[in-house]
Structures are given as structure tokens and as C-alpha cells.
Image (cartoon, grey):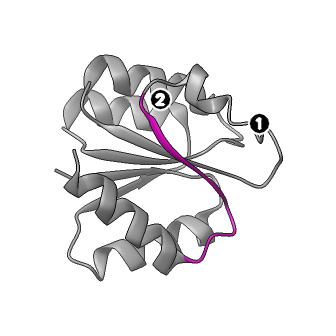
């Protein structure tokens, strides 16, 4: 099952996608909530990588829809802000498995994705 990236910064999404694909993972990348919902309605996903600072839609809505449509899928949230820096993201999104800065190096993100896919 593919990993779904929901990231409005196309360059960042491309770096993440390329790094994950280099590890043999199937990856779908979309810029916002609407496209993420469409993907989750038509495809199974095993893990989502979602930027909390989406410019189109809400990252929490994406996570909520994922929990409904794909109850075993986990979500790695990334952000450029200090939103949820108190760890409360784990109370707001039951499928959250990690909270990272959006500047996390792609190779570190790959390690997180591989870890959470293996424990799913």
C-alpha cells in the first residue's frame, strides 16, 4: 500500500517523495485536503505524511478522514510552526504517530516512515 504525502510546498513534497521512492516505497503526493480525500476514497494507504500548515484544507481533517476510511493507517505530522509543540496533536488525532519539524532531513523522514510501516 502506498504512502500518501499531503504537502503544499511542491519542492519539499518532491524531495520527500523521491527519498521514499528510492527505498522502494510506492508514494502518492498531493497538495491539499481535497486531493487527499479523493486518493483515500479510491486507494488504500498505509501511512500519511501530512504538513500541519496546509494552504488548502485542514491537516486534522485529512487525519480524521484517514482514521475513518483507513483505520490502521498512521499519520506523521510535520510543521514549520510551533503549533501543537506541547504534544497535544496526539490528543487531537488518534492516528498520529509522530510530530516533526518540516525541515526534518528526508533520510530521517524515510527512517520514520519505514519504522511505522513495519509496526503497523
Disc 2 on helix, strand or loop? helix
Kindly give the residue lying farthest to the top in the view shown: 68
Q: Residue at x 22, y 44 (%)?
A: 120
Q: Which residues are magenta?
A: 95-105
Residue labelled with disc 2: 63
Disc 1 on helix, strand or loop? loop
Neighbor class of circle 1 (other Cα within 10 Å; few <14, some 14-19, many 20+) is few
Neighbor class of circle 2 (other Cα within 10 Å; few <14, some 14-19, many 20+) is many
Residue 68: name its quadrant: top left
Q: Residue at x 44, y 41 (%)?
A: 75
Q: Residue at x 30, y 65 (%)?
A: 114
Q: Is residue 118 above or below residue 86?
A: below
Kindly give the residue lying farthest to the right in the view shown: 82
Task: Classify residue 6 as left or right of residue 72.
Answer: right
Residue 91 image point, x, y percent: 58, 22
User: Disc 2 and disc 1: Cα gap in Å?
Assistant: 19 Å
Q: Residue at x 25, y 54 (%)?
A: 117
Residue labelled with disc 1: 86
Q: Is residue 83 above or below residue 95?
A: below
Q: Nearer the viewer, mark 2 or mark 1?
A: 1
Count the marks: 2
Q: Is residue 9 magenta?
A: no
Q: Nearer the viewer, residue 64 or 88?
A: 88
Residue 64 image point, x, y percent: 46, 20
Earlier-in-chain disc, 2 versus 1: 2
Is residue 50 in view? yes
Q: Is residue 93 above or below residue 109?
A: above
Amino acid at each position: 500500500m502506498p504512502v500518501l504525502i499531503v504537502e503544499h510546498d511542491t519542492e519539499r513534497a518532491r524531495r520527500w517523495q523521491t527519498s521514499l521512492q528510492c527505498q522502494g516505497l510506492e508514494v502518492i503526493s498531493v497538495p491539499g485536503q481535497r486531493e487527499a480525500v479523493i486518493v483515500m476514497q479510491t486507494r488504500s494507504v498505509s501511512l500519511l505524511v501530512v504538513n500541519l500548515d496546509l494552504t488548502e484544507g485542514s491537516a486534522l481533517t485529512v487525519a480524521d478522514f484517514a482514521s475513518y476510511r483507513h483505520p490502521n493507517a498512521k499519520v506523521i505530522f510535520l510543521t514549520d510552526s510551533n503549533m501543537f509543540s506541547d504534544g497535544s496533536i496526539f490528543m487531537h488525532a488518534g492516528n498520529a504517530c509522530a510530530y516533526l519539524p518540516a525541515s526534518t532531513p528526508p533520510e530521517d523522514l524515510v527512517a520514520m516512515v519505514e519504522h511505522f510501516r513495519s509496526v503497523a
